[in-house]
Image: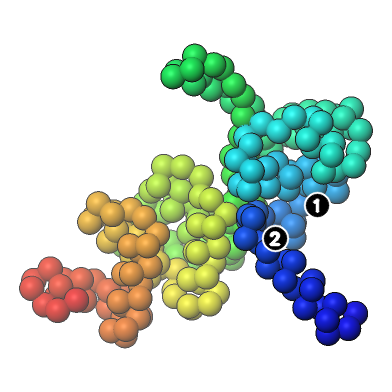
Amino acid sequence: MDSAGWKTWADGASAGLGAGMAIIPHMLLRHYRKLKLSDQEVLLLIHLISFKQVEQKDFPTLEELQEVMGISAQAIAQNLQKLLKAGMISIDEELDELRNIQYERYNLSGLYEKLGRLLAEQHRHPSEQPTRRNTAAEPEQEPGSNLFVVFEKEFGRPLSPMECETISGWIDDDRYPEELIRMALKEAVFAGKVHFRYIDRILLEWSRNRVKTVSDAKAYTQKFRNGGRA
């Protein structure tokens, strides 16, 4: 393709992005085989996500799915049944009270929950768990627990793939010790601000002030509560 052709393609792509762009979880593309999904099933999930995000269609028809996938409506129906049976998707019934109309929508929370747990499983460190039981400083940790499980218990729900990636980033990219992340979670719970942005701010503040251990964090937090500069 010559330079003029590349420019035409780039201009067309840019215009297309302005019309809407779907966000597809990387974990789905990278590990769908581990979830025992076929190529057709994962493509169907991608189209369901796209319809929802770009076209605001929560329940595309078989004909609409057939148009974008290029396979028979029967094959699409069979794939939908497999996804329903596997707990990847569910169908919710909603009521539009203003118009008194009942409608259906595809719910993909099952897929996101499975992706989140798959990501959590990849970051389990069983060999390290016994060494973390030599202190009574964190009584909420149970045998076999890990950082992702602790967060899920505090949040009272499964973590989303994006939240799991945030925790992974703290560990792999920022190199925060796991016990320090647990301590930051405790501080967020204590402050009544149990959300990832607040926990990230705590960790960043500690990093700027060279807080590297739980003991450092406790001393720094005590100083802050006694009126010191945080």
Residue 15 at least partly seen: yes
Image quarter of residue 12: bottom right
- Where residue 209 appears, as percent x and y from the top left, is 28, 84
- Where residue 165 appears, as percent x and y from the top left, is 55, 62
Where is 94 relative to 171, above or below?
above
Q: Residue at x 31, y 69 (%)?
A: 202
Label 1: how many residues lie within 10 Å, few (<14), some (14-19) or many (20+)?
few
Q: Disc 2 designates what residue?
A: 16
Foreground residue among 34 and 165? 165
Image quarter of residue 161: bottom right
Callout 2: SS: helix
* Residue type pointed to by label 1: Arg
Residue 143 at least partly seen: no
Callout 1: SS: loop
Image quarter of residue 28: bottom right
Where is 30 relative to 222, above or below?
above
Q: Disc 1 designates what residue?
A: 33
- Where residue 178 appears, as percent x and y from the top left, is 45, 68
Foreground residue among 72 and 136? 72
- Where residue 121 appears, as percent x and y from the top left, is 62, 56
